Image (cartoon, helix red, strand yellow):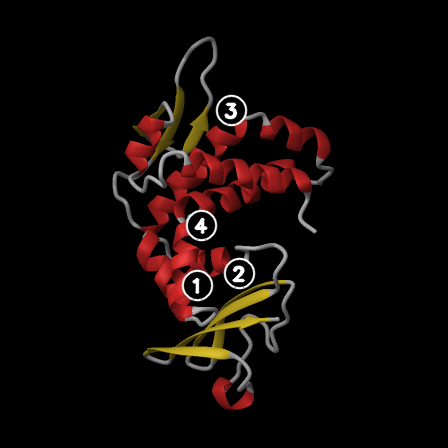
Amino acid sequence: MLDPLIADLLACIEDTHAATEYERDPIRFCELQNIEYRLGPSNLARVGRYGGPDIICVQSAQFGSRDLFTISHEIAHIIAKREGYIKLIRRHHLVRDMKRHIELLMNEAGARLLMPAPDLYSAAMTFGDKPGAIQHIAELSGASQMAAMRRWVRQDFSEARGAFEFDRGYVADAVTYRARLPFRKWGRVPEVALEHPELMLLSMGGGRVLGTVTE
């Protein structure tokens, strides 16, 4: 079961995005949320004090997949701080490395901004649980395949899912939530389609294969 505080945080992030009709332009989204968007020497998020503006600062002026994820991550920091979730997490979550814990949660929250529920719905309606759903999410959102894999796997914490990529017979990437994969990252499976016919696979050319599993 997902921690109630994390579930509430993620719901808040999704509701905030929905209120903007899922605005995709990060600069426009910041305008709608009264967040000042700046370019600078480092990536950071700062909630304004004494009446000052809430600010996110990003290093790149581009909007590639990595840049979009960074922007979404920093916006998630602002929303989480505004709504008091960072204080609650620090108070109630007993973890050894709080900074890393918060950063991982902001990755999860940022992924929901970058790849919102309508993207996952569109992918499900078009591809079901097949690997094409992951590619569809990446194409709609501008996210990387790596990020789309993780968003697809963790779209519903009541479901067991896994996703993986093979590159010339080696497991180049793998992510699961409550689902079991019959191999591990960096493992070698020369003929995955023959050895594991139960898996859903999609050839991407050049020896690369994208796959999914549900339970």
The label number, if any, that marks residue 82 in the structure image: 3
**Residue 144: x and y, percent?**
37, 57
The answer to whether mark 4 and mark 2 are in CB contact below 8 A is no
Chain-order first, disc 4 or disc 2: 4
On screen, residue 105 versus residue 57, left or right, reads: right
Frontmost of labels 3 and 1 is: 1
Given the image, on which type of amino acid does mark 4 rest? Ala
Residue extending farthest to the front is: 125
Which is nearer the eye, 104 or 41?
Answer: 104
Q: Residues within 10 Å of mark 2 (few under 14, many from 20)?
A: many
Given the image, on which type of amino acid does mark 1 rest? Ala
| Image quarter in which the C terminus is found | bottom right
**Residue 72: x and y, percent?**
41, 40
The label number, if any, that marks residue 197 in the structure image: none
Q: What separation in Å lies between label 3 and label 1 (alpha carbons)?
A: 33 Å
Frontmost of labels 3 and 4 is: 4
Q: Which residue is mark 4?
A: 117
